[in-house]
Amino acid sequence: SPIIIYNPGHMVARHEANIMHELAHLLLGHEPILLRTDLPMFRQSYRPEDEEQATYLGGCLQITRSGLDWAIGRGMQREEMARHFGASLEKVQYRLNMTGRHPTTN
């Protein structure tokens, strides 16, 4: 059974993004090109194109397009969206850019 290990030293907002990214690898059926299992240094690496796909799908899983529409419809700014979705500002901006949606400015 697959397991997802996250780094507790990362910012809390990054935990969910990391988990969604790794879940995307599983959903997409990506096979690691490097697997190092000697604990505590467990590490796996994927092809660059697999990483790009997992970044995109992971972002979609964390902040859906309809979720962005909902937040924008309520007048939320990026900071509020980040708090609501448990995401970093960078992840919110990435999803806004990828979907072509943008909050209104006050």
Image (cartoon, rainbow, N blue to C red):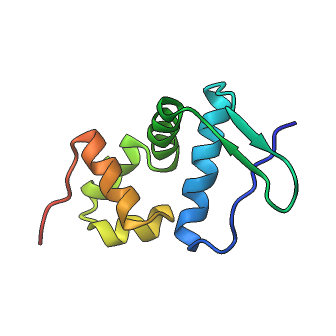
**Looking at the rendering, which quadrant does residue 14 occupy?**
bottom right
The quadrant in which the N terminus is found is top right
Q: Residue at x 43, y 66 (%)?
A: 88
- In the image: residue 25, left or right of residue 71: right
For the C terminus, give its image quadrant.
bottom left
- Most extreme residue toward the left is 106
Is residue 94 shown left or right of residue 11?
Answer: left
Measured as percent of width and height from the top left, residue 6 is found at 70, 60
Residue at 60% over, 71% down = 10
The one nearer the camera, 40 or 60, is: 40
- The number of numbered badges drawn on the structure is 0
Residue drawn at x 26%, y 67% as measured from the top left: 77
User: Residue 36: percent from the left, percent from the top?
Assistant: 79, 46
Which image quadrant is residue 44 in?
top right
Residue 98 is situated, as x and y percent measured from the top left of the image, at 29, 41
User: Which residue is located at x 75 percent, y 55 percent?
Assistant: 5
Q: Choose between 49 and 80: the one closer to the eye.
A: 49
Which residue, as the protein is rendered here, is positioned at the far top?
29
User: On screen, 7 above or below 72?
Assistant: below
Relative placement, left or right, of 35 versus 25 is right
80 lies above or below 18: below
